[in-house]
Amino acid sequence: MKTWEYKIINVRSENYSMDPRRAEELNRLGDEGWELVSITSINFKTGATDHIGMVFKREKAAASV
């Protein structure tokens, strides 16, 4: 049976967008086997999108016996 591990990253958004320089970090996560499975805007006190929340998952390595 496959099992999964998850990583949650909150990124500050500027003018309702994410800094394009984040692509390097996202490519590194992909190289490490992480897959983006969800993205959502996070609104704090201002009612505007202050942060972008991303959820990644990857298959856990099989436990050695």
Image: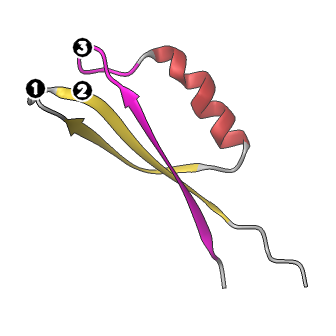
Q: Which residue is mark 2?
A: 50
27 lies above or below 35: above
Q: Quadrant of residue 54?
A: top left
View extreme (front): residue:
45
* Rendering coords of residue 50 (x, y %): 24, 26
Looking at the image, the residue that sits furthest to the left is: 47
User: In the rendered image of this protein, does residue 32 appear above or below residue 51?
Assistant: below
Helix, strand or loop under label 2: strand
Marks 3/1: CA–CA distance? 13 Å
- The residue that label 3 is drawn on is 15
Relative to 34, does residue 43 appear above or below in the rendering? above
Colour convention: secondary structure
Say if 25 sits above or below 2 in the image.
above
Mark 3–mark 1 CB contact (< 8 Å)? no
Q: First in sequence: mark 3 or mark 1?
A: 3
Q: Secondary structure at mark 3?
A: loop
Q: How many other residues sit within 10 Å of disc 2, few (<14), some (14-19) or many (≥20)? A: many
Q: Quadrant of residue 37?
A: bottom left
Q: Residues within 10 Å of mark 1 (few under 14, many from 20)?
A: few
Residue 40 lies, in percent from the top left, at 29, 43
Of discs 3 and 2, which sits in the foreground? 2
Q: What residue did someone put label 1 on?
A: 46
